[in-house]
């Protein structure tokens, strides 16, 4: 029975639970099925007859795609994480990349491999001091933390003021929080690793904590901004309010669904073009689908089965509600602080871009790209409204965080199909209701 030690974690991972019990094995393979890393916890006791057993190193190297004869044996330099009585190391290169030197470290206990790893030139030892960071990046990280606190505290203060004054769409906020809680619970329970044990009941109760917190935050966000947005930019929430009111066949809702899906697809293409343009200019770029958004481990969980993929789909829907509403909270706070619309929008754009810098980007390309995408997002928000912005965020996330392939023979094609079907359903629903009952295909008669 394998359960994570972290009571709030939905599923097991290579680090949780840690490999401490005898018999626990962690094996990492590359896309070609070759061994990349191995950690096997040996038995606590061994028989004397096994003490002098010699490991079959050539067999282990073949599992990683190497020929022992093409490698140079060297003295071991990296200690294994488990006890071992034999160690070995080799230097060489990948057959397909002979210009990149690598080092292979292996260890065995009683003749059985217990540790294996490939050390690349960029591999850092555990506990090594981090590389020095650009001061601009450190300032950006500190400002990002301050920005998050500003949004949370500002939303609480605005919501408290609106509740005391009797303002705000409380019915809509309640419906939003309920939908988010149900979506969040669906995502958590679909991705969680369940076992038939008495402790599972308490674990299920604990796992509802995060969806409940997110639902509460969105309830606060909506109560905080709805009165001010209704007063300052009423066109921004027309279709959104109609959706919360249950008017699911309103043509305006259909229009915003279609526009949001179109913009989300374009936004994803822009995200893909950014690293390509940076590479063409010879500058550092950020792979937005790997270094931002959900953890890589969560994205890769979609590859493990359709149940986990559906859980991620629900989680991305929740995130697509949380972040656009957080952006509206920041926009309202900037407007309140500056007391001018254009000054508030300018402050909003500046704050978003200076707090999103990362260590693996070049500000010369990242900031202009961020300014363009932020400006277009604001255009969608003010011209078509919050609902279109939320749908665009969701569609962009589906394309970014699910594996996309055009080959039906690939084993993960089902995950691609899931993302495309979700987007197609949004577009089909939007087209259907935007015609307000009129036939979408008219018969041509003489």
Image (spheres, rainbow, N blue to C red):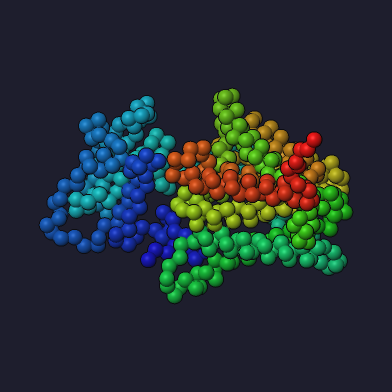
Residue 133 spot, x, y in % from top left: 55, 39
**313 left or right of 173?**
left
Outermost top residue: 281
| Position above or below: 392 against 281 | below
The number of callouts visible is 0
Residue 354 spot, x, y in % from top left: 68, 40
Q: Nearer the viewer, residue 399 or 437?
A: 437
Q: Quadrant of residue 279?
A: top right
Q: Residue at x 58, y 67 (%)?
A: 208
**367 left or right of 333?**
left
Quadrant housing the N terminus: bottom left
Residue 89 spot, x, y in % from top left: 26, 39
**11 left or right of 210?**
left
Q: Residue at x 79, y 51 (%)?
A: 436
Outermost left residue: 49
Outermost bottom residue: 198
Asked whether residue 327 is in view, the answer is: no
Q: Nearer the viewer, residue 326 or 411?
A: 411
Residue 193 spot, x, y in % from top left: 46, 62
Asked whether residue 58 is in view, the answer is: yes
Q: Quadrant of residue 50?
A: bottom left
């Amino acid at each position: 029975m394998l359960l994570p030690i972290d009571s709030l974690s939905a599923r097991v991972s290579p680090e949780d639970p840690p490999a401490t019990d005898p018999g626990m094995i962690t094996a990492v393979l590359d896309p070609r099925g070759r061994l990349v890393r191995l950690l096997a916890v040996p038995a606590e006791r061994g028989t004397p007859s096994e003490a002098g057993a010699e490991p079959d190193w050539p067999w282990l190297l073949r599992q990683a795609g190497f020929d022992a004869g093409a490698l140079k044996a060297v003295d071991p330099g990296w200690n294994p994480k488990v006890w071992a009585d034999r160690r070995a190391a080799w230097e060489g290169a990948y057959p397909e990349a002979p210009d990149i030197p690598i080092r292979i470290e292996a260890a065995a206990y009683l003749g059985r491999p217990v540790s294996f790893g490939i050390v690349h030139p960029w591999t850092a030892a555990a506990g090594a001091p981090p590389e020095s960071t650009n001061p601009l990046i450190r300032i950006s990280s500190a400002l990002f933390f301050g920005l998050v606190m500003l949004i949370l505290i500002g939303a609480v203060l605005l919501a408290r003021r609106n509740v005391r004054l009797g303002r705000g769409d409380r019915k809509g906020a309640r419906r939003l929080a309920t939908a988010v809680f149900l979506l969040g619970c669906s995502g958590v329970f679909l991705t969680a690793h369940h076992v038939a044990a008495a402790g599972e009941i308490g674990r299920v109760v604990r796992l509802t904590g995060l969806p409940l917190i997110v639902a509460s935050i969105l309830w606060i966000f909506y109560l905080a901004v709805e009165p001010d947005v209704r007063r300052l930019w009423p066109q921004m929430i027309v279709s959104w309010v109609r959706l919360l009111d249950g008017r699911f066949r309103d043509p305006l809702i259909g229009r915003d669904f279609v526009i949001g899906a179109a913009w989300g697809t374009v936004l994803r293409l822009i995200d893909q073009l950014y690293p390509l343009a940076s590479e063409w200019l010879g500058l550092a770029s950020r792979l937005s689908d790997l270094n931002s958004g959900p953890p890589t481990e969560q994205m890769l969980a979609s590859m493990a089965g359709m149940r986990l993929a559906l859980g991620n789909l629900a989680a991305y829907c929740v995130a697509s509600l949380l972040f656009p509403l957080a952006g509206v909270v920041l926009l309202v706070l900037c407007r309140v602080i500056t007391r001018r619309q254009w000054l508030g929008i300018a402050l909003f754009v500046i704050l978003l871009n200076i707090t999103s810098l990362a260590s693996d980007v070049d500000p010369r390309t990242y900031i202009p790209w961020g300014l363009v995408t932020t400006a277009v997002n604001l255009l969608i928000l003010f011209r078509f409204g919050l609902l279109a912005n939320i749908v665009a965020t969701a569609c962009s996330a589906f394309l970014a965080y699910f594996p996309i392939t055009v080959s039906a023979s690939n084993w993960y094609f089902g995950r691609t199909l899931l993302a495309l079907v979700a987007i197609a359903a949004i577009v089909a629903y939007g087209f259907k209701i935007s015609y307000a009952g009129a036939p979408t295909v008219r018969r041509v008669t003489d």
